[in-house]
Amino acid sequence: MAGSAEVSEPVDRASTSAVPLPVLEAPGFGLRAAEQRRAALWRQAVGDITTPHYAALVAVMIEPGLDHIGVADRIAADKGTMTEVTRSLLARDLVAVDSDPRDGRRRVLSLRAAGCGRGERIAPLVTVVDELLLAPLDAAGSARGGHPVGQRCRRGWT
Amino acid sequence: MVTLWANVADAGGHEWAPAVVEDQASELNPSVRASLDHSGFALRRARQVHARLWERLVGADVTPGQYALMDVLHHDEPLDLGTLARRASVEETTAVRVLRRLTERGALHRTPDPLDRRGLLIRLTDSARALMFAHTPAVNEVQDTLVSTLTPVQRTRFARLSAVVAGLVTADGTPLT
């Protein structure tokens, strides 16, 4: 459809063929580029607390007593990322990590006052990042789409 | 758009952001709660799904950035470094590093730019094309698998609207670089 980002015709997909897709038709390419822009916007708006750092702070805020495996699960962090997140939040004194007295292998994260304050100060900036990220879609009419994330968050308590 | 990212992120089979739990819902700071709607959580997770698929199906021989650089040149060459890096969505400093490596592998051909005495125009060599084509079936499989839970119309929208968000094309689909 000329003049609109709302494409109604499916592309002739390359599937398993050996024809290289132009980058703009490759979903993985667009995804990677969009995530790069999002990460750059985040760095500008939020600074040195990364997305996984923030997500981990919020996960502990929501579920005090989560261990590091639980936090990794909530924020989709692999082992390496989770180690970096824990180390970084500890170094900034935003969380404390203690062994569970009932199970020494469990390392339980708890929020320090600074972590709570930092998380609450960052939260409005996250909304700003979202607005900036999706702003180019506004020119594309309704292309922005719904807010499944909200639906997903509500899933746990409805 | 957010729905499409979330759909792909969900296909990864893991949580991708903290979710409010019932007994905490009323206690949570409203700004923090609103921030959980950050579409970027879904985008970040969807990108992880893509990275895992690439790792599994394409491997470490060619990165997404390297493939993108070759793909852009394959469709439109020669290009100067700046244009190439922007179209491939690769930082220019990263592009220089990647191009050096590809040149060492004999994958690139550089000639002086007639419009810019200090600049170079970059072309693929036959061996680059061979390298790229060797990986193309796997790369295309990554694309198909990534959006396998979407309808054909959604797949097209996914690529197009992600590129709009990335600032690579305008909302009407006109390339910006």
Image (tube, helix red, strand yellow):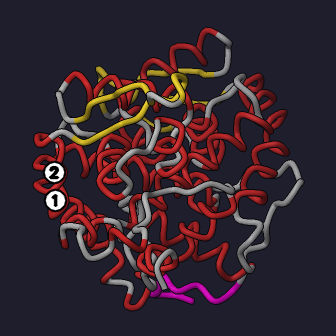
Q: Which of marks 1 and 2 is nearer the N terminus?
A: 2
Q: Is residue A36 above or below residue A95?
A: below
User: Whole-percent x and y of residue B76?
Assistant: 58, 47
Disc number placed over residue A45 in the picture, else none: 2
* Callout 1: chain: A
User: Does the magenta segment cover residue A121?
Assistant: no
Q: Which dot, 1 or 2, sits closer to the camera?
A: 1
Examine the rendering and report whether any part of residue A37 can be seen.
Answer: no
Mark 1 closeness class: few <14, some 14–19, many ≥20 residues within 10 Å = some
Q: Which mark is residue A125?
A: 1
User: Splitting the image into 4 quarters, where does residue A11 fall?
Assistant: bottom right
How many marks can you see? 2
Position of residue A109 in the picture relative to residue A16 (left or right): left
| Span highlighted in magenta in the image | A1-9
Q: In which quarter of the image is residue A10?
A: bottom right
**Tag 2 secondary structure:** helix
Instruction: Please identify the quarter of the rendering in which residue B105 is found.
Output: top right
Residues marked 1 and 2 touching at CB (< 8 Å): yes
Q: Quadrant of the C terminus of chain B?
A: bottom left
Q: Where is residue A146 in the image (x, y as percent from the top left)?
A: 45, 85
* Mark 2 neighbour class, 10 Å CA radius: few under 14, some 14 to 19, many 20 or more: some
Q: Which chain carries label 2?
A: A
Q: In this view, does B146 lie to the left or right of B110?
A: right
Q: Residue at x 18, y 39 (%)?
A: A112
In the rendered structure, find residue A82 and report the number of the disc placed on it: none
User: Is residue B48 in view from this perspective?
Assistant: yes
